[in-house]
Each structure stands twice: as C-alpha cells, then as structure tokens.
Amino acid sequence: VHGLNLTVPENAKEVIKPWDQREETSKDVESGIIIHVPFAQNVRLKGDASPQHLRIYANHPSIVDFTEAESTKPQLDISLLEGEARVIEYPLRVAAFASINSLSLFFSDSPSSLTRIYYIGFKGDVRELKKEGNASMDVPAANAADAALFDRLQEKGGTQQTTAR
C-alpha cells in the first residue's frame, strides 16, 4: 500500500485497518490523494449501504498518477458524504469488482486544502485462481530433463541426442 501526495507515501497503509481500529485518526494530507492497494490474491469487493469525490481504478499494474487519473475512466466514480463522523459503507456493483488484484483510490475535490482519512476498509471475499486450459501442456525448459515426456537416447543407445516421444 502506498500513496501519492502524502508526506511519506508508505504512510497510506495506516488508513487500511481492521474494523475495531476504525475510529483511530490519521495524519493530514494534501487535498487530492491517491492510495494504491495491491492484494495478495484476487478479491471481490462489495458494499450494502448507500453513499466529496472518489474514483476507483481496479487492476492497474502500478499506482495511477494524477495525470493518468484525470485521463483514465475509473471503474467507479462516486460522490462521498461530507461531515459524517460515523463509518459509511458505499455500494459497489459486484460484477465490476469480481476479480480484483489491486485498487487505486483517488480522493479529490476537498473543500479545504487538507484531507483527513480515518478509515478505509474492504468487504468481500478471496477468489481462487483458475488454472489456464493449456497450463498442463507447458514443460518449462529448466525442468525438461526431469519431465516424463522426454527420454534420453543415451540411456538406451549411448547417443547424446534428446528425443520427445
């Protein structure tokens, strides 16, 4: 987890916390920030309750920068409720976030020069990776000698050639 427009980009991880720590506050940052969240596995995000401005970019290989964020269409562009002291859950279309491996969250249009983020949480489940159809046919070159598909003729006839059966 890292961010853009933060004093220390690595401090972005301080707002990703468990539910029981959601009331703890974090440091002030500039008015526009981007937080990039990579996941160890694909996840499906979802929310059940209703919703200044948040754009969500899913599955970008690296963090979205401000220039790219302005020119790229986000998966979700929503207006956030202002002045709420409680945790608010925003609805997501499950189909748009069914197989996510990273998120870049672009918070913008703050009424002041500083933005405060106290808590970011994710609700969803881990998605299992599916094996590709041709994966069983691949024989990596480094392990080709160990594969049962190959037989060395030198073992049978003393020659130095390798043949596939």
Image (spheres, grey):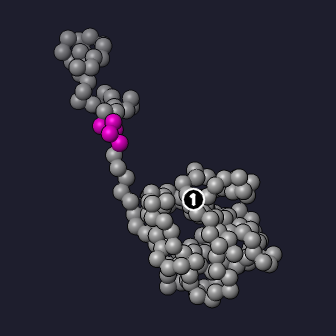
**Which residue is situated farthest in the bottom direction here?**
85
Query: Label 1's element?
Result: loop
Q: Quadrant of residue 65?
A: bottom right
Which quadrant: the C terminus?
Answer: top left
Q: From the viewer's perspective, is residue 46 above or below residue 146?
A: below
| Residue sitting nearer the eye, 145 or 8 | 8
Q: How crowded is mark 1: few (under 14 residues within 10 Å), some or many (20 or more)?
A: some
Q: Residue at x 23, y 15 (%)?
A: 153
Residue 163 is situated, as x and y percent measured from the top left of the image, at: 27, 17
- Left/right placement of residue 61 relative to residue 153 reads right
**Looking at the image, is 18 positioned above or below residue 32?**
below
Q: Is residue 97 visible?
A: yes
- Asked if residue 1 lies in the magenta stretch, the reply is no
Q: Is residue 40 visible?
A: no
Quarter of the rendering containing residue 27? bottom right
Q: Main secondary structure of the magenta part?
A: loop
Quadrant containing the N terminus in the rendered view: bottom right
Give the quarter of the image for residue 33: bottom right
Q: Residue at 69%, 75% (x, y): give it.
A: 52
Q: Which residue lies furthest to the left in this view?
A: 156
The total of numbered circles placed on residues is: 1
Q: Where is residue 62 in the image (x, y as percent from the top left)?
A: 61, 52
Q: Give the range drawn in magenta.
A: 132-136
Residue 149 location in percent, x, y? Answer: 24, 27
Residue ID for mark 1: 75
**Nearest the eye: 105 or 41:** 105
**Would you say 27 lies left or right of 97 here?**
right
Q: Residue at x 64, y 55 (%)?
A: 73
Q: Is residue 135 magenta?
A: yes
Q: For this view, does 136 lie left or right of residue 103? A: left
